[in-house]
Amino acid sequence: MSASQSEAHDDVVLRAEQVGKVYPGTTALQGVDFAARRGAVNVLLGENGAGKSTLMKILAGVEQPSSGRLFLDGQEVRFASINDAAAQGIGIIFQELNLCPNLSVAENIFLGHPALRFGIDIDTNRHALAARALMRRLEHAIDPDTLVGDLRIAQQQIVEIAKALARDVRVLIMDEPTSALSAAEVEILFRVIAELKASGVAVVYISHRLEELVRIGDTVSVLRDGRLQASAEMRDVDIPWMIAQMVGTLADQSDGPATRSGGAPLLSIADVSLANPHGGFLVDHVSLDVAAGEVVGLYGLLGAGRSELFEVLIGAQPDATGTVLLDGIDLTSLPIASRLRAGIALVPEDRQRDGLVQSLSVAANLTLASLWQFLRGLAIDKTRERNAVARAIGNLFIKVSSPDVEVTALSGGNQQKVVIGRALLTRPKLLLLDEPGRGIDVGAKAEVFRTMRALAREGLGVMFATSDLKEVLAVADRIVVMAGGRIAGDFPRAEATETRLVAAANQGTAISVGHLA
Amino acid sequence: MNPLHWLRTHRWAFAGIGVLVLWVALSATTAQFSLASLSGVATSASFLAVVALGQMFAVATGGGNVDLSIPGVVTLSAFATMILSGGTDMGLLRALPVVLAIGVVIGAVNAILILRLRIPAIIATLAVGYVLDTASLLANRRFTTFAISPALRTLATAHPAGVPAILLLALALAVAVAVLIGRTSYGRWLMATGQSATAADLAGVPVASVTATAFVFSGVLAAIDGALLSAHTGGAFLEMGRPYLLQSVGAVVVGGTLIFGGSATAFGTLLGSLLLVLIVTTMQIAGLPGGVQDMVQGAVIIAVLAAAGSGLSRRTA
């Protein structure tokens, strides 16, 4: 192995030159240059749909570029497959967990490159030893013989990381490796990254958590709309710069408080409870009013009962007790369909699973819940449907080349807008959104929140659940804090501070300021 | 260890318990169930086990994959064996490569239809089976001899030390398959592919060739079974592979292999074959008509799938 002189003073291990990728219907990547330096954390940043994951997949050999070239140590390379890239020292940790639940930790780690005795017999002992060593390095006491399906999500993420470390990597691509980890586990991961850096590995790091990137990044490259927007040394830039490069302009969600219409509340719930099958209450005697034109943020920690409250409101929990009034109409014992017709719409938290029909087009997804509006006799009036779809796409600024594109082709933020658009086509009076900002990037979030505020100005009642303090403070007119199934605080925006919200969310005791219903 | 947990990870035990219960019940209640009939049961179960082990590979690839061309392969290979061997051992040497080629080619065709043309396995293999039936029909017209090669007859019908030779063959095959699945990269990759093709693909597993190989195994084992069956029944006839359409799948799932793929047990498939044959024998002893026997077999398989399905939903709930 003799490194040529030119490489010695060039730290770049893996370089992409003018790389492009065209999918049927969309151009995901166009003329992008990217360089991964050895012994450095090379950050890749961009909104959802900016082309990060496409570039990542090209670097790791999962996909082949439509144009442009890749260089490894200055030599042009072509990765035929992920195995091909791995053989040349490129490792990748995917954001979605890609593990086989019925195989053990050790079996998953060595799946792609088993150690063999006599060329055929899998050497289980060597696997167990190596897996144990990897777990020690990652400071996790996970037994290599445990089935992956029996592990917590965070532990599975650790296994995913171990899987990449098990191969001798020179370039390690990490896509949102911290999204499932706790703060302590993130610290461990950062120590491992520092160790990898010291041993000369080039780390390519992708994350939405900008603070994280500032801490561990050495260089940063920002993608926007499939092109390289900017690249810089991390020490020369700060978070506002990164957001500006990603989004184009500095994000600003604040606008004036909504005009509150007086009179009877739009939604009025009294003494709503949902028993926990394991004892106690998931929703514990909640009473609450929401006015038309108001954006109410429902803040709380995980398991505070926010999603369950939404489920009760939409009618998905037939065992709930208490009364629910919408615009004076008693919805209490009505089934979901009747409540939808009465004017409640829910945008669920998991849009991949509950929100969208993956194989249908954007247009079909948009009108799925409101098809009855477009019926003429028994047939669907295509013209009217087309017009409604075009209006929804226009009003919500959904970025799509044609309404007939499959919904999975859209970025996370735009998928979220399709779910909202579908809810709006049912002409609701009250819009419930469960974690509308989860899984979408800064720019798309800002747009979704602007949309929510605009809808409130048009007279809708908007209620959204979140566990993100900044989100709730930036968007809501009024913040209701839930803890342990109960309402633990109810603050007008002007009186809400991070400290008060956190205190309320953690105590579980009612500190009521202002109008508690 | 918790016995319930043990049962969850050793699903073949259910079939084992079933075999024991039926055997004890039959021995206790009827004098007809002699050692001789036990040997008959073992022989039938062995023929079933050979095709079921092949079916197990197809099922293990996951995604609801199944090989329904097995009956067609069995019948065609039986015809090929009879016609080409002409009842001599020299002829058998001529026939064997053709029999194996039938298995490999049909398996490869199935794999191409499923992987390249993306036709669901259940439709693709069913259609291939119909094409094979036509080929058998043509072979039937040229069919002139009922002579069987002596070597093949020994393998299919001999009882060294009272044990059917075919049972020893099935046992050896099951051991080989168990080693292949439990101890080699191929087995590990097959399980990974069945559990999550995406995860396997991204881990560098050659998912397409793993799946294709599984269907080739299925085809080859069905072809071998056809050759042996022709020696056992003393000839080839149309639809002779027919009972294996449901029984091969039944033996696999009754034995504890997950119908959704990603988990397979050769030992379980062996026990599953034995249990299915015992159930049929029980009904024959009880004097139930053939139609009722088919109904009960179908019902047993549906019951097993329902139990496995509800167990699955409970775990994910």
Image (tube, grey):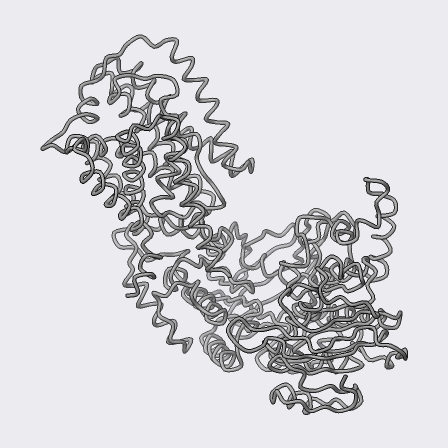
Observer-nearest of A166 and B99: B99
Observer-nearest of B29 and B209: B29
Residue at 57% over, 59% down: A59
Residue B76 in the image: x percent, y percent?
Answer: 38, 21
Quadrant, the N terminus of chain A: bottom left
In this figure, what is the number of numbered marks? 0
Residue that lies at the very extreme toward the left in this rendered image: B161
Q: Nearer the viewer, residue A74 or A56?
A: A56
The percent coordinates of residue B272 (x first, y second) are 31, 41
A446 sits left or right of A101 in the view: right
Q: Residue at x 28, y 58 (%)?
A: A123
Q: Is residue B195 above or below residue B56?
A: below
Lateral position of residue B73 relative to residue A299, left or right: left
Q: Quadrant of residue B303?
A: top left
Residue placed most toward the observer, A49 or A3: A49
**Quadrant of residue A480 within the rendered picture:** bottom right
The quarter in which the C terminus of chain A is drawn is bottom right
